[in-house]
Amino acid sequence: MTDSSAFALDTMDYRILRELGGDGRASDVALSDRVNLSSTAVARRRKALEESGAIQGYSADFDFAKLGFGIVVIVMIELSSQAEQALVEFESAVIKCPSMSYCSFISGNTDFLMIVHVRSFEDYDRVYRSELSMLPHVAKIRSSFVMREVTRRNVPPAVLAGRAAG
């Protein structure tokens, strides 16, 4: 949610969010059984959570390896300038990179952190040459290859901890 002061969540909202975090496809009837509330009340609360922006959407989780993209690369990019125009130009260009699934402007020695999914090391070489190195204002690109994914969460448990117990 972009404006955290716009919508106050209560214990039941957090319980519904916790359940949806584990199963975003859960019906209102299934949620009502899990949180001990009528399906009509669950539907009303879910709609309010969606309208407030607390729930921004629903998506499917993909197994990239099964889709042929078994290599995950963490890419750290430093720009030659942090001037507003350079940032805007870089961000506009990076959004168009078809191999990138995630990009954030971060603090520290690196300006941007990206996640790229590729089929092979040769495929990453192609992505590096045709996408990453073509981005404007890039001074340095560092790449780290994910050796093993330990866990992946859409919502860290701490976000809903303590509030969903009721």
Image (cartoon, rainbow, N blue to C red):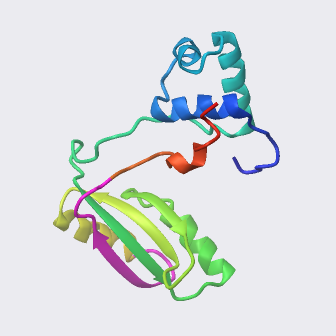
What's the magenta region? 134-150
Q: Position of residue 83 (x, y in %)?
A: 65, 84
Residue 141 is covered by the magenta coloring? yes
**Where residue 37 sits in the image (x, y, percent)?**
65, 15
**The stretch drawn in magenta includes residue 41:** no
Q: Is residue 77 above or below residue 16?
A: below
Q: Residue at x 69, y 33 (%)?
A: 11
Residue furthest to the right in view is 6
Give the image location of residue 99, x and y in percent. 36, 58
Closest to the observer: 29 or 146?
29
Q: Is residue 5 above or below residue 43?
A: below
Tell me if 53 is positioned left or right of 140 in this view. right
Q: Residue at x 59, y 73 (%)?
A: 89
Relative placement, left or right, of 35 versus 59 is right
Q: Nearer the viewer, residue 136 or 14?
A: 14
Picture residue at 46% right of the left edge, 70% below the top: 113
Is 95 drawn above or below residue 38 in the view shown? below
The mark tally for this picture is: 0
Which quadrant: the C terminus? top right
The picture quadrant where one finds residue 128 is bottom left
Q: x and y percent of residue 133 in the render?
A: 37, 77
Q: Quadrant of residue 8?
A: top right
Residue located 61% across and 30% down the image: 15
